[in-house]
Image (tube, grey):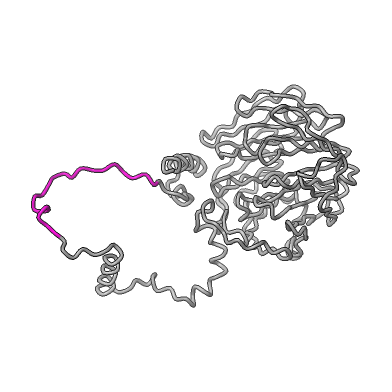
Amino acid sequence: MKRKLSNLNDEESRLSQLLFNKSKDLVEKLKTTHSDESAPEQKPAWMDEDDHQISVNNAKSKVAYTENLKQKYETLMGTPNWAKLSAKVKEEGDDDDDDNEILRTVGHIKKRKTVNLPKDYLEMKMLPKINSQTKTEGKIISCIDFHPTLSVALVAGNSGVVSLLSVGGDVNEKLHSFRLKNWKTTTAQFSPNGSEAYIATNLNHSYCVYNLVKAEPKLIQLPFVVKRPKIFKLSPDGKYIATSSGFDEICLISTASKELLRTIKHNSNVESLTFSHDSEQLYCYCTQGEVTIWDLSTFKALKKFYDNGCVNASCISTSSCGRLLATGSQEGIVNIYETSKLETYEPLPIKTVTNLTTKISSLKFNATSEILAMSSTAIPNAVKLVHIPSYHVFNNFPPQSNVLSHVQTINFSPNSGYMALGNDKGFANLYRLKYYKNY
């Protein structure tokens, strides 16, 4: 176990050194774990024979010895001011403590209390915009992704600039940025291990793999049938890329070899697609509402079903728990299904959400499958958050005092401590979801 933890720390250190320009201060600031491996035993420079004659007749326990030293120190030096924090002061700072708790804990280890997420009111706080220091990603912020282990966000838009920024502090510091020429980013995702970022555009016959360890972007040609990728999706396990020009063919590419594995064909054009949580299946959502589920071990269609009431399909998403599937139409209707109950061609959704009235452009479940975010680019502030399993829409979001403009994309951090929304004003808005204590 110690050896595995040490290997993880080594990998995290390499990533941190790259992201933060090899600054030791920043590496130490974001480093969340320390190696447990003990240093090799050192031999003494000399041996004093008198030391062997010393005996401790009244040896104290470690706790008693520590307390004794503490009392002697306070008697001689007094209690330091920093240790005199009163309970009253701490109570007055409770709000700040809640906001900063996420920065003081090891987010992927600490367990939160098993209290259900309230269904009517989602407690949150708006933080400084992620890209407030850069503002070079373009007017349309089309992509936001959170690093799987570090408190770092990737922000990209229609200017071709991709930025990496720290998340959660008083200021979201710019860590690194690079520009791709003649590029309007439509997709940007970190790989599951966080060592690479996959970036695509619908203007070129190629995609970019950015190596975070080497700080090296590499353009890779897409298969011949994909002229300009309208769809580009990385599987949760990082093994596959599914891409399409928006016609009836989907190309599956190996991320290891960068070679085409298989082309799967449909009866109509594919509007959107999503992988299952375990990357074993692929859900393809065709223009007229038919969904085909493919087995990625055999590349055969497992089943097909029609999205209830759909006239024109828009987007599709699966939950990280694997139990739920959400579909969104161009009429603003969102259907939520249980994946275990898709046996018939016309299954009924467990919930239909009709709070939006324009084309659904984004659907995203949070990591715990307790929130479904939906948005539309058609009108300002067209975004809603649905509580699961009650399927109530949170009534306090979007806040009336906060104009989000036209929301282009929405995403959650790995443990849902943060939520980010990109808009058409060039900003990536950041919210702290206080129910979730971890990044």
Classify residue 231 as left or right of residue 150.
right
Classify residue 376 as left or right of residue 91.
right
Residue 354 in sight from this viewpoint: yes
Residue 428 in sight from this viewpoint: no
Q: Which residue shows up at 57% across the image and 48% down it?
A: 152
The vertical placement of 84 against 286, above or below, is below
Q: Which residue shows up at 61% across the image and 56% down it?
A: 417
The vertical placement of 93 against 130, above or below, is below
Classify residue 157 as left or right of residue 337.
left
Q: How many marks?
A: 0
> To which quarter of the image does residue 239 belong?
top right
The vertical placement of 311 against 374, above or below, is above
State the image coordinates of residue 224 (x, y, percent, origin top left).
Answer: 74, 22
State the image coordinates of residue 46 (x, y, percent, origin top left).
Answer: 13, 45
Front residue of 132 and 16: 16
Front residue of 297 and 241: 297
Q: Is residue 44 magenta?
A: yes
> To which quarter of the image does residue 178 belong?
top right
State the image coordinates of residue 232 (x, y, percent, origin top left).
Answer: 72, 35
Q: Which residues are magenta?
A: 36-55
Q: Which residue shows up at 61% across the image and 47% down it?
A: 146
State the image coordinates of residue 270 (x, y, percent, origin top left).
Answer: 82, 34
Q: Chief secondary structure of the magenta span?
A: loop
Q: Residue furthest top?
A: 224
> To which quarter of the image does residue 347 belong?
top right
The vertical placement of 419 against 263, above or below, is below
